[in-house]
Amino acid sequence: MDYKFSINNLTYNFKDLKDLLAKASPHRSGDVLAGVAAKDNKERVAAQYVLSDVPLKDFLANPIIPYAEDEVTRLIMDDHNMEAFYPISAFSVGELRDWLLSYDATPKILKEISPGLTPEMVAAVSKLMRNQDLIKVAQKCEVITKFRNTLGLKDRFSVRLQPNNPVDDPKAIAASTIDGLLYGCGDAVIGINPATDSPNAVSELLKLLDDFRQQYQIPTQTCILSHITTTMEIIEKAPVDLIFQSIGGTQKANESFGINLNMLQEAYESGLQLNRGSIGNNIMYFETGQGSELSANAHHGIDQQTCEVRTYAVARKYHPLLVNTVVGFIGPEYLYDGKQITRAALEDHFCGKLMGLPMGCDVCYTNHAEADQDDMDALLTLLGVAGCNYIMGVPGADDVMLNYQSTSFHDAMYLRKVLNKRPAPEFETWLLKMGIFDEHGNRQRLTKSHKLISNG
């Protein structure tokens, strides 16, 4: 197929699918930095016109990284479910977009076709969508996971309680954890980014969180976001609930993280053998983010959003409890301002949900980006409408260890209130039992007294 389009006697030629996907992508600083972006909006529109006519089958016939060169490509191709793909196999990218927005694409049918979608198909269709399209389709995708509680149910909204500390001070971590719980946060996970990755330090933090969880019988899960090799070293000696790892969309990107697919598989199987989840066996927690591949010089000339969606194929393999796009964390070199961060977050959430992943989002930015907390308030609200499974809860929205701006405990309370969403059901029952929440009419609210500190 020739990838070309003419506008006013000017013909735009795109040399292959990789080039076409990059040129059709909405403008962002990372693609400009990589030299793959459209040179202007005319070329971008021409690429989007051409992309809309590309048959979905072309993505199966023409991998954007050769099969022999990349193990993520091999995973994508080998795990593709042709039976699930069959109902949409005659579609072009544009026809897939129209169908996704139609009444025919019900939540049940979207779940059935999900294994038949490759990341390149999903990335392609997202490039033809307005923000409201991304929100509308993502809102129809319900992805439910379970460990000690049930996440992702309709009209539920969860929070990762993130009590990071620059020196892993146990008292400071405990204080932040209590603070977050008193705002109803922590049902997704209580998860710490450790200041050091040493096995002894990670083990101590795991024991701290697990002792606290058991003392108050909190129906949630805990995680120390250490490197997967550290977790595997201590997995039989420390109370490991979830196995965490940052992942990328190419083999080279994953190698830059010090991992490969065999390591992820080994960790997944080891985690299942622990059998620590009381109601489910989703035991992996992955973090991702647009620009990771470019920052590692591991992008193969692919635009950063398509690389990101390839990451979701890696995550999907291991049935995670949580997937989190840390959307503005890398900085303005990749997502320059609030507009680009917002677009990227809505793309990531849509693409992950369509591929069957339990997507959360760290609604965040660095202090040298052209963004502020008003941008994050708007994005937080859009993601809530789109059905995002969870966000971060950081004391004061300012992570003093990772040095970036995120969302606070009260931000989560705001979203639950204005959109009438509730915590995970098992966690909600615990909040009511502890007197942290009470029923007020048909809605819940924080109480002025509670048992968490008084019982301590």
Image (cartoon, grey):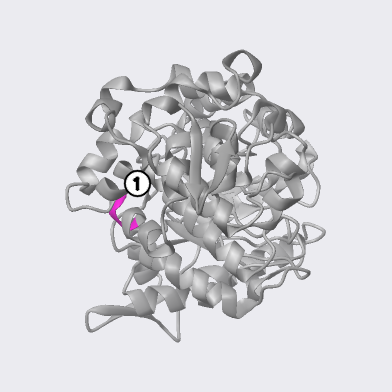
**Can you say which quadrant of the picture contains the N terminus?**
top left
**Can you say which quadrant of the picture contains the C terminus?**
bottom right
The segment highlighted magenta reads 139-143
Q: Residue at image x 30%, y 27%?
A: 85
- Position of residue 441 relative to residue 188, above or below, is below
The reply, left or right, for residue 366 in relation to residue 344 is right
Query: Dot 1: within a 10 Å radius of its alpha carbon, few (fewer than 14), some, or many (20 or more) residues?
Result: many
Image location of residue 166, percent across then percent down: 80, 61
Considering depth in this image, is 178 or 320 the residue closer to the camera?
A: 320
Main structural element of the magenta stretch: helix, strand or loop? loop
Image location of residue 29, percent across then percent down: 70, 57
Considering depth in this image, is 235 or 246 the residue closer to the camera?
A: 246
Element under label 1? loop
Image location of residue 225, percent across then percent down: 66, 45
Considering depth in this image, is 155 or 302 the residue closer to the camera?
A: 302
Image location of residue 69, percent across then percent down: 65, 17
The reply, left or right, for residue 178 in relation to residue 51 is right
Residue 453 appearing in the image:
no
Asked if residue 319 lies in the magenta stretch, the reply is no
- Position of residue 214 relative to residue 92, above or below, is below
- Position of residue 372 relative to residue 42, above or below, is below
The reply, left or right, for residue 327 in relation to residue 432 is right
Q: Quadrant of residue 301?
A: top right
Q: Which residue is mark 1?
A: 143
Report the amino acid beneath label 1: Val
Q: Residue at image x 64%, y 30%?
A: 250
The reply, left or right, for residue 295 in relation to residue 245 is right
